[in-house]
């Protein structure tokens, strides 16, 4: 029989904001856009922690909802199917299907196999997209550095102190390399000693993250 995908989701995690973003979310056949939430202890987190495909039947779902105190307002489905999305050995999200029709175990296992094939295709597309984005970012930064090199040669002839400040600005600015702190050391005594010359950014990590 065909897989019921009227309650279906594809989600990705954001490690920095500790959020889960649903790039596809269907509930009762209706699509919901722009849905995200903070990481907690729901089905999605369970899938991420498991690092493998999951098949839970209704009795197991009831126990899971009670044990984790999940505020589950919808009727409990007959089965829960989930597979992780992995890119370069890292789990970045998952695909989840809730089915409300009673199906045999053999049919559910076939559905899991299909989901794994879909997950591999989706993860491959995400990896290609990430690589393309990384290449664009590398090209942009290289262009910035090339322009900066020309400008720094001009500045070096006029003011050495301004040269060092320009260098640190390129390293820490959002249009440059994007680091939130940078220190400049100059060598002395034939490379036996380093002397701090200039720095950009706070010494407090929390302040540095906020400024960045």
Image (cartoon, rainbow, N blue to C red):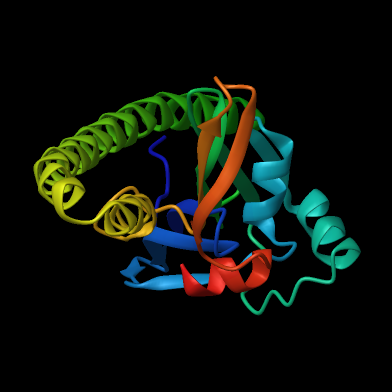
Residue 115, above or below 30: above
Query: Which residue is at the far front?
Result: 189
Q: Is residue 78 visible?
A: no
Compared to residue 202, the image places residue 89 above or below, namely: above
Which of these two is toward me, 175 or 2? Answer: 175
Q: How many marks?
A: 0
Residue lying farthest to the right in this orientation: 67
Image location (x, y in percent) of residue 212: 46, 67
Vertically, is 199 above or below 81? below
Residue 202 position, x and y percent, is: 59, 68
Q: Position of residue 72 (x, y in %)?
A: 69, 74
69 displayed left or right of 145: right
Corner quadrant of residue 125: top left
Looking at the image, residue 58 sits to the left or right of residue 39; the answer is: right
Closest to the observer: 146 or 119? 146
Q: Is residue 201 above or below residue 152?
A: below
For the question of whether residue 156 can be seen, the reply is yes
Q: Nearer the viewer, residue 207 or 183?
A: 183
Residue at the spot 42% in from the left edge and 68% down from the top edge = 28
Asked whether, in this view, residue 121 is left or right of residue 71, the answer is left
Residue at 44% x, 52% y is 179
Q: Quadrant of the N terminus?
A: top left
Residue at the (87%, 57%) spot, across then down: 63
Residue 192's spot in the image, x, y percent?
Answer: 64, 22
- Identified at 35% across, 65% down, the residue is 29
Q: Nearer the viewer, residue 67 or 171?
A: 171
């Amino acid at each position: 029989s065909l897989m019921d995908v009227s309650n279906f989701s594809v989600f990705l995690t954001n490690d920095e904001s500790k959020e889960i973003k649903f790039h596809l979310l269907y509930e009762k056949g209706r699509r919901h856009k722009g849905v995200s939430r903070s990481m907690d202890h729901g089905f999605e987190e369970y899938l991420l922690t498991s690092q493998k495909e999951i098949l839970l039947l209704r009795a197991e779902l009831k126990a899971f909802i009670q044990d984790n105190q999940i505020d589950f307002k919808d009727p409990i489905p007959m089965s829960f199917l989930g597979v992780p999305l992995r890119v370069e050995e890292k789990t970045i999200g998952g695909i989840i299907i809730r089915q409300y029709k009673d199906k045999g175990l053999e049919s559910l296992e076939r559905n899991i196999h299909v989901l794994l094939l879909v997950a591999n295709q989706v993860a491959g597309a995400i990896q290609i997209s990430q690589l393309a984005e990384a290449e664009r970012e590398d090209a942009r930064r290289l262009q910035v550095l090339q322009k900066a090199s020309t400008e720094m040669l001009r500045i070096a002839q006029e003011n050495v102190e301004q040269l060092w400040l320009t260098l640190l600005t390129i390293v820490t600015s959002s249009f440059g390399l994007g680091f939130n702190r940078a220190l400049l050391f100059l060598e002395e005594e034939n490379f036996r000693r380093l002397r701090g010359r200039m720095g950009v950014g706070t010494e407090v990590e929390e302040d540095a993250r906020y400024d960045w």
